[in-house]
Image (cartoon, rainbow, N blue to C red):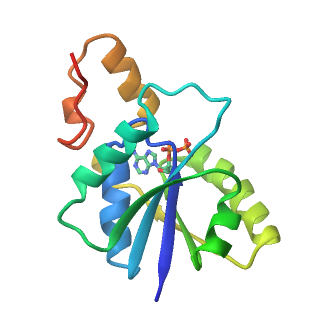
Amino acid sequence: MKRAIFPGSFDPITLGHYDIIERGVTLFDEVIVAIGVNASKKYMFSIEERMDFIKAAFKHEPKIKVVSYKGLTVDFCKKNDVEFILRGLRNPADFEFEKAIAHTNRDLAPIETVFLLTAASTSYIASSIVRDVIRNNGDYTKLVPDSVRVKQ
Ligand code: ADP
């Protein structure tokens, strides 16, 4: 069974993440969308909200699992029999950042990182921008799956 993890904060999931996950499903038998919990980071959405947004967005897709995890991604992979880490690349800055993480992970465990180039139509989207739009009462709905809705 080819299993991949797609790790991230997903605060909140965007159409960019959605695109990578949907395409990941065509490459792997199972894609685990894993929300990394970092106690020192401040999030806009709670872990439960972030999980619910992702689960609802993919309720039609049995090959996608949604979990949260603490600690190193490679340790999660070892414990859960995951051989691949899936990441999206938007631009050269993502590449440089991801390269260092992928090399480090490869030193820590025999796990391959697989990169997908983002779709041109969503490559400008970042969760941080979505949060800014939400904070300033803009129309964020074009940037995220329908399952992401802010309680008024
Ligand atoms: P973090 O910043 O905590 O790593 P993110 O939720 O921002 O987590 O990103 C998780 C993954 O999703 C990364 O591989 C990132 O490159 C990818 N990603 C983020 N935004 C997009 C986008 N608009 N299109 C495609 N991939 C994206």
Residue furthest out toward the top = 136
Q: Position of residue 133 (x, y in %)?
A: 33, 19
| Side of 62 relative to 71 (left or right) | left
Name the residue rendered at 51%, 42% in the picture: 9
Q: Nearer the viewer, residue 140 or 63?
A: 63
Residue 108 against residue 39 in the figure, above or below:
below
Q: Nearer the viewer, residue 70 or 94?
A: 70
Name the residue rendered at 51%, 66% in the picture: 5
Name the residue rendered at 62%, 70% in the picture: 77
Residue furthest out toward the bottom = 1
Tally the marks: 0
| Side of 116 relative to 92 (left or right) | left
Name the residue rendered at 30%, 64% in the picture: 22
Q: Nearer the viewer, residue 128 or 48?
A: 48
Q: Position of residue 143 (x, y in %)?
A: 26, 36
Q: Position of residue 78 (x, y in %)?
A: 67, 74
Q: Is residue 124 visible?
A: no
Q: Is residue 121 visible?
A: yes
Q: Position of residue 94 (x, y in %)?
A: 58, 47
Q: Quadrant of residue 26?
A: bottom left
| Side of 52 relative to 59 (left or right) | right
Residue 39 against residue 116 in the figure, above or below:
above
Residue furthest out toward the right = 107
| Side of 42 relative to 151 (left or right) | right
Residue 12 against residue 114 in the figure, above or below:
above
* Quadrant location of the C terminus in the rendered image: top left
